[in-house]
Image (spheres, rainbow, N blue to C red):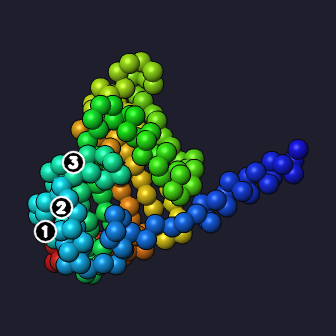
Amino acid sequence: MKLFICISLFLGMSLSVWAEEPTGFWGVKFGTTPEEVKEIMAEKEGIKLLSDSSGILTYTGVGGYWSNERIDWLSFRCHNNNMISAMISLKPIADPLYLFDEIINKLNTKYYRTKKIKRSYRSPFFAGDGHELLAISEGYATISARWKFKNTEISVHVSKELTVVVYYEDSSGVQQWINQIEKTSYKDAEMNDL
């Protein structure tokens, strides 16, 4: 019995190590330049470039679909002329919790079955009370899931606007961006002390 448990634990932990790692989002590889992102996205139907500022390309959904779900908006963050993350907000036709579960199932099938799923409610709300969507929209609930790989990460959550947001990131690229922000903030703080 102990051997079975040890093998099961090993296989469960190993699946995320051996799983196919995302290399980008929706045909846009991490490291792609902003101009290349625009070219690739121009070929997609039902989305329109809304803004291009400060390294963020934001698109709005105008009848577009991703993974058979309606797009509300999507954005790509670029740092040092490389795409480092992508975020997409999906408008559920009916229940955002159902859409959340569908997206989780699709990602579990494509990559690996995550154990990092959080469904937490704060008083006065609780799971199964019939007021889950009100709890989410008022900030009393967190519904999220996460997949971690060697170099990338995917997360999904239900937003206060009751959309389902999916986030893909190149972990090292995002960390470089954070380091630069911290370095800049530190330099700004030093200048303010003068």
Quadrant the C terminus occupies: bottom left
Residue 52: mark in rendering: 1
Q: Tell which of 122 and 156 is nearer to you.
A: 156
Residue 72: mark in rendering: 3
Q: Badge 1 local density, few (<14 within 10 Å), some, or many (20+)?
A: some
Position in image of residue 10 (x %, y %): 74, 57
Residue in the picture at 44% in, 39% down: 101
Please indicate, yes or no, whether residue 14 appears anywhere in the rendered image. Answer: yes
Mark 2 vs 3, N-terminal side: 2
Residue 86 figure quarter? bottom left
Residue 58: mark in rendering: 2
Residue 124 lies left or right of residue 38; in this view the side is: right
Position in image of residue 87 (x %, y %): 30, 58
* SS at mark 2 in the image: strand
> In the rendered image of this protein, does residue 58 appear above or below residue 55?
above
Q: Are marks 2 and 1 in contact (CB under 8 Å)?
A: yes
Q: Are marks 2 and 3 in contact (CB under 8 Å)?
A: no
Q: CA distance from mark 2 to mark 3?
A: 11 Å
Residue in the picture at 64% in, 59% down: 15
Residue in the picture at 24% in, 57% down: 74
Q: Tell which of 190 and 160 is nearer to you.
A: 160
Q: CA distance from mark 2 to mark 1?
A: 6 Å
Residue 163 figure quarter? top left
Quadrant the N terminus occupies: top right
Mark 2 vs 1, N-terminal side: 1
* SS at mark 1 in the image: strand
Q: Tell which of 101 and 169 is nearer to you.
A: 101
Q: CA distance from mark 3 to mark 1?
A: 17 Å
Position in image of residue 49 (x %, y %): 13, 63
What amino acid is at disc 3? Asp
